[in-house]
Image: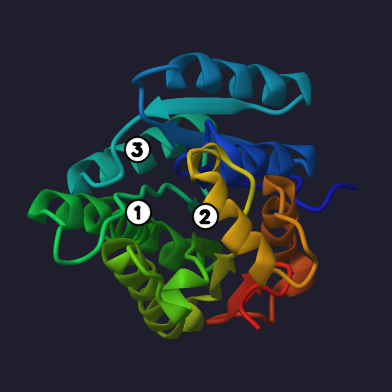
Amino acid sequence: MTLLEKRIALVTGGSLGIGKATVLALASEGADVAFTYLGFRKHQAEANEVVGSVKGLGRRCLAIESDVSGFKEAEDVVRHVMAELGGLHILVNNAGITRDGVVWKMEEEEWDTVIDVNLKGCFNYIRAVSPVFRQQKHGNIINIASINGMRGKFGQANYAASKAGVIGLTKTIAKELGRYNVNVNVIAPGMIETDMTEQLTDEVKQQARSEIVLGRFGKPEDVAGLIVYLVSEKAQFITGEVIKIDGGQYI
């Protein structure tokens, strides 16, 4: 029997990178999966590809075009998933963006946009699923932060602040929902090979690689495998934890 048989999951930002790998990993372990994506550029085609891959695994899949920063939109997405797939047991808050720049040059819009997506987006979906998880007295929430939310990073005041906020949010929600048998954890990746990191300069990549004890970047599947474990029955005594997955970059 697969680890997540008869479970239904929702992943934000599921058409690319860590989100895509997570959708596929959850489906591989027996879960039906819904995911959100932004429908601009090539994301529509990539979302369709993910849906096809999940269905190829014999699982149901639902792709929903949505902006995670919208409070009402999050409620609508959760209701849609419940109606179409018949329930919800797992939430993975993965959607995130960067708008890097030193603080003395950072525009208000660059600050607000990153906070709205990375931090408020997590709150929006936690708020939307909490009544469901409380009522059924079961659920798993995984929030994706970053080691830069733990240590800070030059040129990333907005991103680091948003991810530090995700860590504080996770610990608080773990305390609030623990009595309802809901596990809430946060994963803090280091440098992972994604479309986002591919846009970095060679100099930035080399600096990051020099920090990593294992001498290489991680893969989205490394993070997805940890997520599968944390939402499975094997990890039901783990909650409120910040788990780094960074090849030793934080050391």
Query: Going from the N terminus, do you reach mark 1 or mark 3 first?
Result: 3
**Which circle, 2 or 1, is nearer the viewer?**
2
Which residue is outermost to the left?
Answer: 108
Q: Which residue is mark 1?
A: 125
Residue 204 in percent (x, y) is at 52, 55
Considering depth in this image, is 225 or 232 the residue closer to the camera?
Answer: 225
**Which circle, 2 or 3, is nearer the viewer?**
2
Q: Which residue is mark 3?
A: 77
* Helix, strand or loop under label 3: helix
Residue at 70% across / 36% down in the picture? 24
* Horizontal side, residue 209 vs residue 86: left or right: right
Tell me, yes or no, whether the two marked residues, 1 and 3, touch with CB atoms within 8 Å. Answer: yes
* Residue 173 visible in the current orientation: yes
Residue at 61% across / 78% down in the picture? 250
- Dot 1 amino acid type: Tyr
Query: Going from the N terminus, do you reach mark 2 or mark 1 first?
Result: 1
Query: Going from the N terminus, do you reach mark 2 or mark 3 first?
Result: 3
* Helix, strand or loop under label 1: helix
Which residue is outermost to the front?
Answer: 203
Task: Tell me which corner region of the image, top left, top right, bottom left or bottom right, holds residue 131.
Answer: bottom left
Q: Which residue is mark 2?
A: 204
- Determine crowd level at label 2: few under 14, some 14-19, many 20+ residues with C-alpha closer than 10 A: few
Residue 105 in percent (x, y) is at 15, 58
- Dot 2 amino acid type: Val
Task: Tell me which corner region of the image, top left, top right, bottom left or bottom right, holds residue 244.
Answer: bottom right
- Dot 3 amino acid type: Val
Q: CA distance from mark 2 to mark 3?
A: 37 Å
Q: CA distance from mark 2 to mark 1?
A: 32 Å
Residue 31 in percent (x, y) is at 69, 41
Residue at 46% across / 71% down in the picture? 148
* Quarter of the C terminus within the rendering: bottom right
